[in-house]
Image: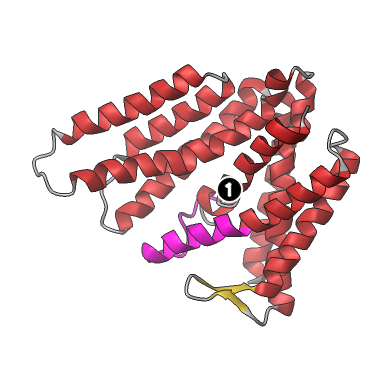
Amino acid sequence: MRVNLLRRLVTALVFLPVLVIIARAGGGYYLVLIGLGIGIGTYEFLTMLEARGMKPYKVLGTFCALLLGWTAFYQSYLFTYLTFTILLLALSITELSRRVEEQAINHIATTIFGAMYVGWLMSHLVLLRELPYAMGQTYSTGTGYALLPFVLTWSCDSAAYFFGIKFGRHKLLPRISPEKSWEGAIGGVFFAVIAGFVYQQVYAHFLSWFDIFVLGFLVGVLAQVGDLVESLIKRDADMKDAATTIPGHGGVLDRFDSLLFTAPMIYYYLRFFAAR
């Protein structure tokens, strides 16, 4: 466990400065970074479905997931609709070329789900960085928006992990994730709120104390829901990790699973309630 923890720390020390620098730069640089996460994460997810005996179209699903990130960058609803149309039509036409008719619905549905689950949800990280355009604010404000889900989510994940090891006694959902405990979950929520208050003082003066409390609490809950959902999928596929892409963390999907749930919530909360 110590070796794995050391790998996690080294990976974090390398990735976090890169994330901050690219988030500050924004634009195409940030789109490429998140695009890598979307592309690799979608491919990992569809590969994981293959382990369950399903046969998604991995290349087509990954391509359309990347298009969703691109449409988020340009804030284009038209191109978002076009992406969904391309995906549906291409899947339906491609399925006609298969020599067997069985599982046609399975092939199409799993590909769509993979592109939506990873591509659509993760594209909200791009939307957060580009939020100042929609709100009529200076572009540099987007750095604070972009880093917010990472800070709150990973604070929650880390606290839940260490609280679970130290104080974990009561299992949260043992049939899905035997190692997770109520004590760890409560610790994760608590530290997500604390991290939010610290972040508000350093980088998010645009948020009120009330907003940061609500966001911290919701992130603390949804981050762990996202982790449990991926655990459910991996358990169904009989896999411990989605991949081995990141040393000490498993795959990209293992590291970003919580963000798939927290980034959309943060974006819509800011969009409709806080960032005005």
Residue 127 in percent (x, y) is at 62, 29
Look at the picture and state if 55 lies above or below 122: below
Is residue 9 at all visible to an observer of this figure? no
Residue 234 in percent (x, y) is at 43, 61
Residue 160 in percent (x, y) is at 69, 65
Position of 41 compared to 75: left or right?
left
Q: Nearer the viewer, residue 137 or 198?
A: 137
Q: Residue furthest right?
A: 201
Look at the picture and state if 106 lies above or below 206: below
Position of 124 compared to 138: left or right?
left
Amino acid found under the numbered disc labelled 1: Phe
Q: Residue furthest front?
A: 273
Is residue 206 at all visible to an observer of this figure? yes
Magenta highlight range:
224-249
The residue under the point 9% across, 44% down is 100
Can residue 246 be found in the magenta stretch? yes
Circle 1 SS class:
helix
- For label 1, count other residues whose C-alpha is less than 10 Å away and answer few (under 14), some (14-19) or many (20+): many
Position of 40 compared to 146: left or right?
left
Quadrant in which the N terminus appears = bottom right
Residue 276 in percent (x, y) is at 78, 27
Residue at image mark 1: 261
Position of 220 compared to 171: left or right?
right
The residue under the point 58% across, 23% down is 73
Q: Nearer the viewer, residue 210 or 2?
A: 210
Specify the color scheme.
secondary structure
The residue under the point 18% across, 49% down is 103
Quarter of the figure with residue 3: bottom right
The residue under the point 42% across, 59% down is 233
Can residue 37 be found in the magenta stretch? no
Q: Nearer the viewer, residue 87 or 273?
A: 273
